[in-house]
Amino acid sequence: MQPMNAPLSASGWLSQAILRIEADYLRSADTHLIPLRLPVFAADGIDLYLKDESTHPTGSLKHRLARSLFLYALCNGWIAEGTTIVEASSGSTAVSEAYFARLLGLPFVAVMPRSTSPEKAAQIAFHGGRCHFVAHAGQVYDEARTLAEQCGGHYMDQFTYAERATDWRGNNNIAESMFQQMARERHPVPSWIVVGAGTGGTSATIGRYLRFRRHATQVCVADPEGSVFSAFHASGDATLTAPGSRIEGIGRPRVEPSFVRTLVDRMIEVPDLESIAAMRSLSALLGRKVGPSTGTNFVGMLALAGEMRASGQQGSILSLLCDAGERYLPSYHDAEWVRRTFGDIDEAQRRIDAALAG
Ligand SMILES: *Cc1c(COP(=O)(O)O)cnc(C)c1O
């Protein structure tokens, strides 16, 4: 028996690397689909569900992406024994990629904005990765590319490859898993699936799967303030830029190649304070803390549920619990930090409370 993280031997390195990722996958379980029992909507035949992506070994939906990106790069011959892996990230992807890099015995460097939560940086270090900070979110791409060139490493480039590294037809991707888990529910085919967009990979995978399986489900992207995606969705102009998002993990300053506009049926722009208020309300409902991008998703779900109720439409709405709140205790879950960073939350909280009260 080989110890788990023993060095892969030089001969057949690629084959062993793929085997090691497959073995890791076989040891993993699927993530739960949690019914959100909200009487205010359930009484009118509208059911809400969250797929809990926080339970992956590295704590977020990016575990799926990291696995896919590594397999894609390995099968393309872009990674070999000793290759340094470099990634541009707002944090979660880097945590998951650091995990897979260590599994394969490869050095890993994460290029991230200085504002990234220290908890994520600590987790990258925990998995043996190195953090390299830049001042602004828009600088991560060039910096990561340059670093990779300098050390002869590989720039993973999630913002380009997320949409194509994942098997969109199935292979137990997130969409196929959702539909399997909904099979015995009263509305098994959702009216809406609501997601945020960071790379845009999740919305692309779900959107393609829906079309391929000929489901009537529509995809809604809940987009935070300062993100370019909403304006791009409306205009189709890929040269647009924006200031960038203050909700970690979602919303981008530039149009990412992985965001496929034609796969998104609807955009909902979500003010930051509503994202945070919804994050708090949802945390209270679930009895455990969720991250801010999950709050953004919840705002989108509440808006769509309200519209369905108003038009007498019954059905289900699915979204993602992207990561847990523990990564954000000193920030989004700290009332004083929120007031300093975003201002007074009371009005936004009243709007979310009103939506939940019906
Ligand atoms: C990346 C990320 C998202 C968005 O997912 P994409 O597939 O990259 O669009 C949402 N929430 C969190 C916490 C993330 O890290």
Image (spheres, rainbow, N blue to C red):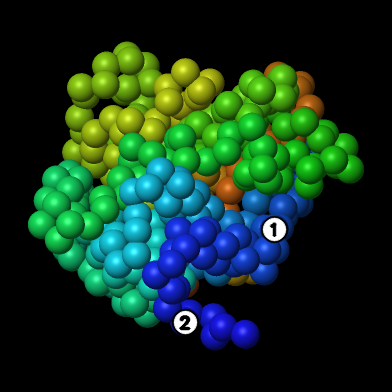
Residue 315 appears in the picture as rendered = yes
- Crowding near pointer 2: few (<14 within 10 Å), some, many (20+)? few
From the top left corner, tell me how far across and down residue 78 is, in percent.
Answer: 34, 49
From the top left corner, tell me how far across and down residue 155 is, in percent.
Answer: 26, 50
Residue at which label 1 appears: 30
Question: Quick check: 324 left or right of 249?
Answer: right
Seen at 19% across and 38% down, the residue is 243
Nearer to us: label 1 or label 2: 2
Residue 199 appears in the picture as rendered = no
From the top left corner, tell me how far across and down residue 193 is, in percent.
Answer: 62, 34
Please, what is the three-letter code of the amino acid marked with disc 2? Ala
Q: Report the label total.
A: 2
Residue at which label 2 appears: 6
Question: Quick check: 137 left or right of 171?
Answer: left
Residue at disc 2, secondary structure: loop
Seen at 63% across and 44% down, the residue is 173
Quarter the N terminus occupies: bottom right
